[in-house]
Image (spheres, coloured by chain):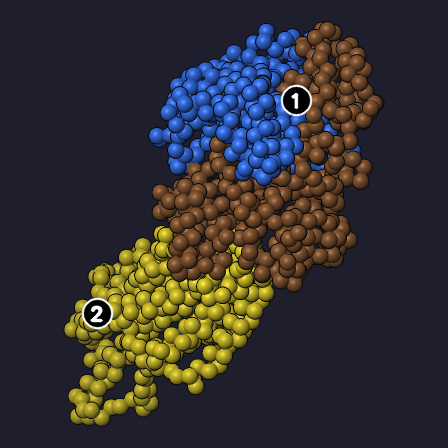
Chain colours: A yellow, B blue, C brown
Amino acid sequence: MTGRLMAIVRKEFIHILRDPRTLMVSFVMPLIMLVLLGVAATTDVRNMPLAVWDQDKSAASRQLIEAYGAADYFKLAYDADSGAQIEQLITTGEAQAGLTIPPNFGADLAAGRSVEVRLVIDGSDPTLAQTALAAATQLGQAQSVRVVTERLATKGQAGAFTMPIAVQAQVWYNPDLRSAYYMVPALIGIIMMFQCVVLTSTAIVRERERGTIEQLIVTPVRSSELLLGKLAPYVLLGFLDTLEILVLGVLLFGVPIAGSVPLLLACAALFLITPLGIGLLISTVSKSQQEAMLLSLFFLLPNIFLSGFFFPIAAMPTWLQAITYAFPLRYFLTIVRGIILKGAGVTELLPAILATAVYGLVVMTIATRRFHKRLD
Amino acid sequence: MTDGSAPDPGTLTRSPATSSPPASSPTPATQLTPLVSGRGLRRSFGEVRAVDGVTLEVRPGEAYGLVGPDGAGKTTTLRLLVGVLRQDEGTVEVGGLDMTERPDEARSRMGYLAQRFSLYGDLTVWENLRFFGEVRDVRGAAFRARAAELLGFVGLTGFEGRRADALSGGMKQKLGLACALVHEPDVLLLDEPTAGVDPVTRQEFWKLLIRLLAMGRAIIVSTPYMDEAARCTRVGFMHSGRILVEGTPRELTGAFAGHVLELAASPRRAVRDIAMADPDVEDVLAFGDRLHLRVRDAAGPLARLPGALARAGIALERLRPVAPSMEDVFILLLAAEAGRAGGPRATAEASHG
Amino acid sequence: MAEPAIAVRNLTKRFGTFTAVDAVSFEVARGEVVGYLGPNGSGKTTTIRMLLGLLRPTSGSAVVLGHDVAREPEWVRLRSGYMSQKFALYEDLTVLENLRFYGAVYGLSGSRLAQRSAEMLAMVGLDVHRDVRAGSLAGGWRQRLAMAIALVHEPPLLFLDEPTSGVDPEARRAFWDIIYGLADGGTTVFVTTHYMDEAEHCGRLGIMSGGHLLAMDTPTRLRESVAGDPWNITAPGANLAELLDRLEALPGVSHAGLLGDQVHLITAPGTHAAASLGAAAAPGAGAVADGIAVERVEATLEDVFAVLTTAPGGTPKEVAA
């Protein structure tokens, strides 16, 4: 029995090594996806071009402008001389925000009066706009506090001002809010899922297309051996990919791994069962490699969008949130982000781990049953 | 019959629009001008000479069999004749039209059933026919009349609404034939049309072909099967890109008449050794329950072998001259060819024929 | 007398209400080369699948090499070699890798596997090409590789499915020489085919139609016992199709076809003589009366097949695929 199984496994490896496409998908694709998603698709808002219409041109207004420019979020890009020009710059996209300082800014401030500074933000990209809004407001407030403190100081009450409610915000796990840290762990899940589903389903369908499955049926090979033999290399590939992404994540993006790597790998192994089972299932209903590929994508896309990878689940409508429980990737992302970013352990992740295990078991059972029947 | 197993012995009428007149009175084939002729055809794929100087002509009412194993160049030859491939050298003429100069007109005279001919599985019988008709500019009322006729001819009437992938192998072949005939071609080229098809279906298919011949069409059939060669009016044995010999089946087997003996006795190995030992026996070909001996002269072995077998304690069941089979003929030709060319060619390159 | 290699008794297989194989019985002795023919839908493939242990019979028994196939299908498969014309080799594996894979699948390993692989490659002449990818092999060589694979584990029973289809006569002869050599050594060979060329190489032929085994005998005896008189009629200058139609319509003619430039007929035994056929052939359009030749010939295997499978009780039906 092991002889036959080993023979099938060995043959599968030869197929993989000799198929440049599979190798590309296995090893180069994760790298590309990692780099692209990690670097290019950052949702961090930085260096937003800011157009400024300083109608005051006083020391105070310059101070405000410098404060805006000093923070990472904005980049002082244009010195506008009218509201219309600001509008135009935003419309053409050359500026993403416009700051208008009223004519008597400095004087009013010095006189102890409140001033209103107008900030216009390009809302066409809500993510950017929100961050810009938050940043701008915060900067404004910080400036206000500074001004008040100065005023009090001139009145002899230096340092006496404190904010009645101080919100001590501390961002755990990803203090710099770097999206790379968020993306990379999730990428592990996505790539593993993609690999296992696509490669497994197409590998099996390819064998059927060629007719070699027919030939194997008349041999003493059992369908369980065929199954295991065909899946084994993709398990290994899945693992290697996990390691590849982890290593690259740490090297390229400095993603710190807070939790236990062995636990991560163990959970990855558990998670693998599901996409392998899905790949198997797809192979039993597909008549061609093309069909297998399309069905795989059909399965993968909702998983990607609804697992919390791009879009936070919390932001979705309640009914959609309920649906996300049906997607296995959701649980795995919880696990993988938990381990890498939060250093979570088994106890914290137990529900997600159990969910993954159950999912895998169910899918694999259905798939193997169909596979056996097909061969007979 | 409604299950499509036997064709109605109907005839296909020719619409008046076609340019070539139907052959009404049977003129001896040799006096008619060829409907298709290929002269000095050569075609290579890289280093492989798939077709190496082929000349053949087919006249109305003839079924020409291009016989040879896989890789001999049959498919390439057919493709050259149909104009799907351009020849490196040589000319192709169809009804007097040069394929290179007037390809569209030439091709409109031909129907082609490719080896890997696929029908559109998810289209019905009728839809498949209609598609091939449209592609050949046969539409509307003319098409409908033609389609009904063709379906009757091949015995698929009543199956118009059946999806092509729900047809049996034989019925698919018949539908393929109908699709190739939809534009009333003068010549029909069939590339291994009966591959994988059971003998009964093959018989029926050939009956259809015979009726086409009776209407004055010409047919070129390629096949690797020797027994199918026997059905053709004329046969060209093809090997390694060339036609070794041409003739009617009777001419070909007649050339070797008197040179084949049938010997039935067992055990096979011992009998074969004894036969090979006879000086007039050139070759021994084994079959299931007998041997064919190729002899220089029949008289000697006929006289000597019974005694030789008896001395070895072997009972002789039968020893007599028989007409050579097409297989015998081919092997003889190949042996002669090998003798001339200095040995059989290595066939490790991918086959293109 | 040694126990038969295959003993089939009243083997029946039903799929729902459809009876694919109906009480088929036959025996194959060790070392025999037996052919099995039948049109599509005749039950031929189903029978083979039962012999290979891929399908369980509804009733009856199939005992292969002394073991009941229904109860020990794995045992049988381990000792069977299978060579299919549609054999799909692993294109991206080399000749040797393909061979070693199948060898391992049949339980060979280590030095035995290496030895047998080398022997098989030498036997079929592929040792020079052992490191060539199977996908680059031309037709005849693929067939040889398929054969090597079928034989690598020295099976006492060999199933061949259209093994020499499309192969040139020299290669076919080499192939059959090997098979006969194996048969002489005790290997039992079971061939399924549509082609009479191939059927001729079998010692005995079984003909199936409509689920029934209609005959099982040597090709010679089958030909001799065909229920009909075969004739070849030559009519130079005649419109062959018209002649064929006319002759086919004669009473007593059970089959008619063309053989090159001759009409080949089978008549019910004793209903016709050369004279009557000649007369029937004569009044043809343009036929020259004294050029007509009527010859009583031997039945071909094709005749045997046609007569058996289209007789009442053996009518083949066009089955939708």
- Can you tell which mark lies on residue C259? 1
- How many labels sit on residues? 2
Q: Where is residue A51 in the image (x, y as percent from the top left)?
A: 25, 63
Q: Where is residue B332 in the image (x, y as percent from the top left)?
A: 50, 24
Above/below status of C124 relative to C15: above
Q: Which residue is tagged 2? A: A69
Residue placed most toward the observer, B282 or C176: B282
Q: Horizontal placement of B276 versus A16: left or right?
A: right
| Element class at badge 1 | strand
Residue A11 seen in this snapshot: no
Mark whose residue sits in front, 2 or 1: 1
Q: On screen, A133 above or below B149?
A: below
Q: In this view, does A249 lie to the left or right of A344?
A: left
Q: Is mark 2 on a helix, strand or loop?
A: helix
Residue located 56% across and 49% down the image: C186
Please, what is the three-letter code of the amino acid marked with disc 2? Answer: Gly
Three-letter code for the amino acid on which mark 1 is drawn: Leu
Residue C231 position within the rendered picture, expressed as x and y whole percent measured from the top left: 73, 21
Residue B340 in sight here: yes
Residue A6 position within the rendered picture, expressed as x and y whole percent measured from the top left: 43, 63
Q: How far apart are the alpha carbons under marks 2 and 1?
A: 97 Å
Residue pictured at 73% horizontal, 29% vertical = B7
Residue at point 79%, 14% (across, down)? C275
